[in-house]
Image: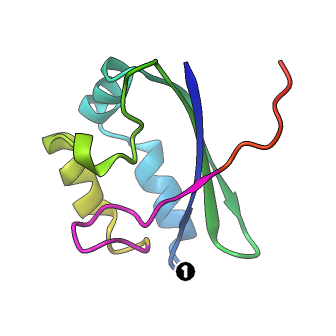
Amino acid sequence: MTRFAFKMKLKPGNEKEYEKRHAALWPELKQMIKDAGVSNYSIYWDKETNILFGYQEVADGAANTQDTSAADEVTLRWWAYMKDIMDTNPDNSPVTIPLQEVFHLD
């Protein structure tokens, strides 16, 4: 299992919409994430900077949810759905900055 942490940027004024969309996460997206080997997935929001901090655990050999080379049709639809409220790349994927782990305690 690999721990993967990353940050993304939420566009100002879209905080409630972001929460609303994730509260109604598509069942097929939830299932795809689990089937892909991703677990213990959380996203946190820093109100001062509008930075979103994501954390997930990924099965060995599996791709994380931000890996554009592993994006399936459901993920591509989700990215297109979210592009109006987040900083995104030309392919609609969220601009994702991986974070280096510097400490871990079990």
Figure check: 24 above or below 30 = below
Left or right, 10 with reference to 67: right
Left or right, 61 with reference to 27: right
Segment tinted magenta in the rendering:
87-99
- Which SS does the magenta portion mostly show? loop
Q: Residue furthest bottom?
A: 12
Q: Nearer the viewer, residue 13 or 106?
A: 106
Q: Which residue is mark 1?
A: 13
Residue 6 colored in magenta in the image: no
Residue 40 sits in which quadrant? top right
- Residue sitting at 28 percent across and 27 percent down? 32
Figure check: 97 above or below 75 = below
Can you give x and y, in whole percent of width and height, for residue 48 in the image? 76, 75
| Pointer 1 local density, CA inside 10 Å: few below 14, some 14–19, many at least 20 | few
Q: Nearer the viewer, residue 82 or 104?
A: 104
Can you give x and y, in whole percent of width and height, for residue 43 in the image? 59, 47
Q: Considering the image in quadrants, where does the N terminus appear?
A: top right
- Residue sitting at 39 percent across and 63 percent down? 94
Can you give x and y, in whole percent of width and height, for residue 95 in the image? 43, 67
Can you give x and y, in whole percent of width and height, for residue 71 in the image? 23, 44
